[in-house]
Image: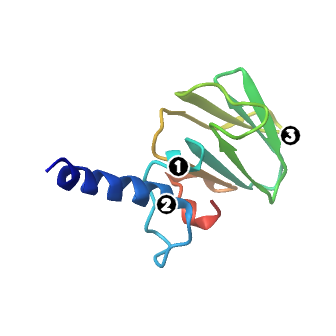
Amino acid sequence: MRLARAIPMLVAVIAVLGACQASESPNQYAGLPSNACGGFHLKVVNQTGSRVQVALNGTWDTVIPDGTTLTINEGLSTPQPPQLPWQVVITDGNTGSQVFSATMPGPVDQKVTLTTEGPIQTPYDLSEDC
């Protein structure tokens, strides 16, 4: 009887561990936690025309050049980002003006696309490049 109750849990664990593998549907994992892939992910896509600075909790930051993308991973980025929740502040590297600010508590991965029209925040679909 114990084995019968354990099988659904085992199937769920295997499904989570397989979440970072290629999927048939590109949106199959959108908005789901990704702890199987190193914890929370924040993907920043910079299409603003200038470099941007991404700061987390005022203690960790990085610069993302125009036309590039960076995924910050809670468990695997170097240097190690601070513990969640993250207070994310993104500023324009040329003017110093703030272009985005949000608190990200996890566990649902997030994607912030920065354009000249403004930022767009959506759940990050790990099937893009996990």
> Is 103 rendered above or below residue 46?
above
SS class, disc 2: helix
Q: Are marks 2 and 1 in contact (CB under 8 Å)?
A: yes
Relative depth, front residue between 90 and 72: 72
N-terminal of the two: label 3 or label 1?
A: 1
Q: Residue at x 86, y 40 (%)?
A: 94
Q: Which mark is residue 19?
A: 2
Q: Residue 4 location in percent, x, y?
A: 18, 55
User: What amino acid is found at the position of numbered circle 2 in the picture?
Assistant: Ala
Left or right: where does residue 112 sit relative to residue 49?
left
Relative depth, front residue between 31 and 115: 31
Left or right: where does residue 125 sit relative to residue 77?
left
Which residue corresponds to mark 1?
36
Evaluate whether residue 60 shows in this view: yes
Question: Comparing marks 2 and 3, which lies closer to the viewer?
Answer: 2
Evaluate whether residue 119 shows in this view: no
Which residue corresponds to mark 3?
94
Label 3, residues with CA under 10 Å away: few <14, some 14-19, many ≥20: few
N-terminal of the two: label 2 or label 1?
A: 2
Q: Are marks 2 and 3 in contact (CB under 8 Å)?
A: no
User: What amino acid is found at the position of numbered circle 1 in the picture?
Assistant: Ala
> Is 4 rendered above or below residue 98?
below
N-terminal of the two: label 2 or label 3?
A: 2
Q: Residue at x 83, y 50 (%)?
A: 50
Relative depth, front residue between 87 and 39: 39
Q: Quadrant of residue 69?
A: bottom right
SS class, disc 3: loop
Q: Residue 49 location in percent, x, y?
A: 81, 56
Left or right: where does residue 108 sit relative to residue 97?
left
Q: Mark 2 to mark 3: distance in Å?
A: 38 Å
The residue positioned farthest toward the left in the image shown: 1
Q: Quadrant of the C terminus?
A: bottom right
